[in-house]
Image: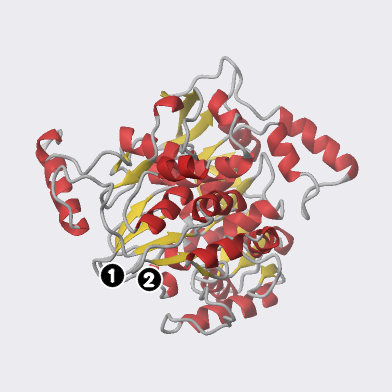
Amino acid sequence: MPQTLFDKIWDRHVVRNLDDGSSLVYVDRVFLHERTGGVALTSLAESSREVRNPAQVFATMDHILDTYPGRGDATEVPGGEAFITTMRATAREAGITLFDINDPRHGIAHLISAEQAITLPGLVVVCPDSHTCTLGALGAIGWGIGTSNCEHALATETLRARKPLQLAVEFSGELANGVTAKDLILYLIGKYSAAGAANHAMEFRGPAIRALDMEARFTLCNMAVEFSAFTGLIAPDEKTISYVAGRPYAPVGNRWDEAVEQWRALRSDDEAAFDKVLSIDVSEVPPTVTWGISPQHAVAVTAGAPELDTADSNEQRAEFTQAMDYMGLKPGQPLIGLPIDGAFIGSCTNARLSDLRSAAAVLKGRRVAEGVRAICTPASAQVKQAAEQEGLDQIFTGSGFEWREPGCSLCFNAGGEGFGPEQRVVSSTNRNFRGRQGPRTRTHLASPASVAAAAVAGCIADVRQYQEAAA
């Protein structure tokens, strides 16, 4: 029977189908972070249970630690230091690998899981973080879980789950100037709503996906959860195999050859049936930015906040009104020219080397506008080091950006770092929910290059004008 990519990986991992329609699924890797990892390990120990396979469990510090230069265990979060020290102590006690604050392999969980080849094509990987779907770019099932499920996975190497329906999103055409994977996913969510993939696992496919480099694919899969998908994934190809080759936890020798042979078979069969199919011509996608308080509030940067009479229902009209009230906008108000107070490039969505390069190309020879606080936090220590070797840090700091240490931090307020009430920020992150980047802070999501353009302009701007001027 023809199978989808998701079918193939799922079926290989089912330990037992249960009477209630769910399945017990084998988990290859568990990744922890200090916000919940120490809690899960402590709870496990208190119940006299152990980590079943420490060699397949990894941990990092990313959610709570500061990103200021010279940071240590102290954080701006009351009690935050205890999360860090508990994570360190429990990881040591459990015998799992921890990428600690000063480890050269340190960074945001999803980034280093890929950088180190801890996640490989065809694996099932879980982490108590909803953006674990990022790892679908490698052709793996990346699955965000809660703390109690984390304990179960640590103790048994399995999780109980109901198999989701399957959605294919076909991307055709060629990207226009100034358009990135971030614009593609915002466009998709804006067109079909934040609930567009609810109860589905989604596969990104088509010639436009094959044309994307690996870092762009990570960005796309990272935001599958913002489309309400169970996960998002992309069939591995030669770009995937080249990306994995030679990384620290990648197989070697005969095991590498055997693995590659299996990975090349990891694709949906031609006759495989999906429960739902969407098609996008990427040549129609413009540089995109959000106006409201959900990723689904995404429009072309040349557009504006919606008119209330365009709402499909009274509920949507109320949603528009509440979102505009929070964001300090009026119906129909253009986005270009809207003054900003902050610009942030970071997060597991858009703080990879290619993201920093695209932003630096806009910033080179320019200055951040007066009154704009601009911050960049590379996603991992390796990204930071590579950027510094290229001199990108000098471009960022020379333009007026703060150059920080890796971590989640300003993606959300859990690290205690944030922007001020009613400050307007253009951000390369994945969520623009109320208070996400600080109490009553107003966040507009965009690509890193668009964030850089806004920082220079002092207002939301069309990145194409800055790229054309630099050409």
Q: Is residue 326 visible?
A: yes
Q: Which residue is mark 1?
A: 439
Mark toward the start of the polypeptide (1 vs 2):
2
Q: Is residue 179 above or below residue 413?
A: above
Give the label on residue 315, or none: none
On the image, the x and y values in percent for residue 117 come to 71, 51
Q: Is residue 392 above or below residue 271?
A: below
- The answer to which image quadrant residue 439 occupies is bottom left
Q: Is residue 369 left or right of residue 395?
A: left
At 42% from the left and 62% from the top, the residue drawn is 368
Q: Is residue 240 left or right of residue 363?
A: right
Q: Judge by depth and name the residue closer to the eye, 366 or 20.
A: 366
Secondary-structure class at tag 1: loop
At 51% from the left and 83% from the top, the residue drawn is 81
Find out whether the residues at labels 1 and 2 contact each other: C-beta distance under 8 Å: yes
In this view, which residue lies farthest toward the right? Answer: 253
Q: Residues within 10 Å of mark 2 (few under 14, many from 20)?
A: some
Secondary-structure class at tag 2: loop
Q: Is residue 408 visible?
A: no
Q: Which residue is mark 2?
A: 418
- The answer to which image quadrant residue 277 occupies is top left
Q: Judge by depth and name the residue closer to the eye, 94 or 138.
A: 138
Q: Residues within 10 Å of mark 1 (few under 14, many from 20)?
A: some
Q: Judge by depth and name the residue closer to the eye, 49 or 202.
A: 202
At 46% from the left and 28% from the top, the residue drawn is 169
Quadrant the N terminus occupies: top right
At 47% from the left and 51% from the top, the residue drawn is 448
Please name the amino acid that badge 1 sits on. Answer: Pro
On the image, the x and y values in percent for residue 260 come to 78, 35
